[in-house]
Image (cartoon, rainbow, N blue to C red):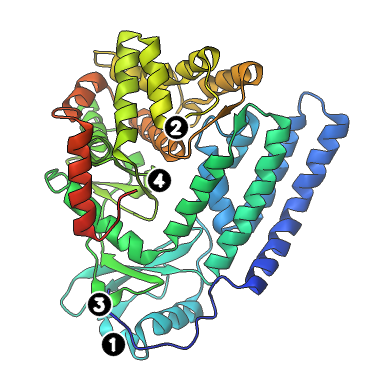
Amino acid sequence: MTDKPSQPADPERNRLSGRIARTAKVGANLSGAGFAFAAQSLFGGDEGDQRTAKALAAALGKSKGPLMKIAQLVSTIPDFLPPEYAAELSQLQAEAPAMGWPFVKRRMRAELGAGWETKFASFAHEAAHAASLGQVHRATLHDGREVACKLQYPDMSSAVESDVGQLRTLLGVFKRMDGSIDADAMVEEITDRLREELDYAREAKHMALYGAMLADKSFVTVPQLVPDLSAERLLTMTWLSGEKLSAFESAPQDVRNHIAEMLFWTWWAPMNSYAVIHGDPHLGNYQVTGGGTGINLLDFGCVRIFPPKFVGGVVDLYRAMLTDDFDAAYAAYETWGFENLSRELVEVLNVWARFIYGPIIDDRVRSVADGIKPGEYGRKEAFRVRQLLKEKGPVKIPREFVFMDRAAIGLGAAYLRLGAELNFHKLFEQSLEGFSIDSVSSRQSAALKAAGLRSS
């Protein structure tokens, strides 16, 4: 990104007034959910959780912005929320009404200066896509390149800080209701990742990092940054066109299998070679190209860079599950950073691990989970684990686990949507060729340095 002429003081910084206004707005939306929770506490009944969950989802749906994104995020982590709440919150939609042309003009002028429109051959007034933190406009440069201009909404820093406070309040309620998981570290992880999503300079570096890590995967295309047209709250990159994954749900089996295999390598190659994951496995972040011969990878706001030893724990637990080695599994959880462990708690955690690792342990062609709908992937197992943790726990979940768990579930749901049938065990073993923590550390250090990022 290039240096821009000095601008007037930024009115959108994390302002106290903005945080107060946001808290008041969100608090008003949540008041109905709070009333429902109080009523449930008094009158309960078998359907109490369901009613409260519906009220909470309705309140969050009105809030938009970061809190809705948080709700969507935690709903995709099966062991984070009780099932009634996860089911309701998972239905919140990522799409949000776009800001109008007056906002777009103000934002573009603030980021690129007066006469910004002359820098483009054309610029669409209507947003091509709008989400909880920003919107994307399609444009054409004078050299003929089509680009995507990602604009951040106003006052997002204030909104994030306010909404994180609301998240703590909500999870405090869940903790009193449930008590099976100590989620404090998980909240810190979500908070840090949300703040990073507002840092477009960092996202540009993530994009470069993924371009380098996947350079030898010719079937994957990553957007390229246009530095001269990017700034603090504007990210301009090459426009990528492709079809939605859902368009291939009825394609021939071999086509669906090939798409699933490309998804596997797009996610696991950076993880097992560089200790980096794309932490937002939303289906909209993948596009299929060439009728099923390639994929586009989009949106690099939520990228998790792990300490290399964390990946060592992932591989150690895989091997422990493969050989049914309890002591090795215990050691792997400790490597990950789980606290308050006991033999009984590790046995409970192994219930979840056997589910997550099941497809890569089983050396045969299979689906990722037979007879399970994409939206239900992991729900039954997570519910069982929560029930057992109520008896044996609580257990303190390490913050690194949040996006690892979430991404694994999101990837599994994509496989289910495609009805893919693969030998996941052979693919995973191939991804481990030459694996060692030292080699991961060396590759990660070089890749991060090249992208201008620091190690975890």
Q: Amino acid at mark 2?
A: Gly
Q: CA distance from mark 2 to mark 1?
A: 52 Å
Q: Is residue 15 left or right of residue 268?
A: right
Residue 337's disc is 2
Indicate which disc, 2 or 4, sits on the residue closer to the N terminus: 4
Viewer-nearest of discs 2 and 4: 2
Point 25% across, 81% down: residue: 121
Residue named by callout 4: 280
Point 42% across, 18% down: residue: 330
Residue named by callout 1: 118
Indicate which disc, 4 or 1, sits on the residue closer to the N terminus: 1
Give the mark count: 4
Indicate which disc, 1 or 3, sits on the residue closer to the N terminus: 1
Q: Amino acid at mark 3?
A: Asp
Q: In what element is the residue under mark 1?
A: helix
**Which sits in the foreground, 341 or 276?**
341
Indicate which disc, 3 or 4, sits on the residue closer to the N terminus: 3
Q: In what element is the residue under mark 3?
A: helix
Direction right: furthest residue: 42
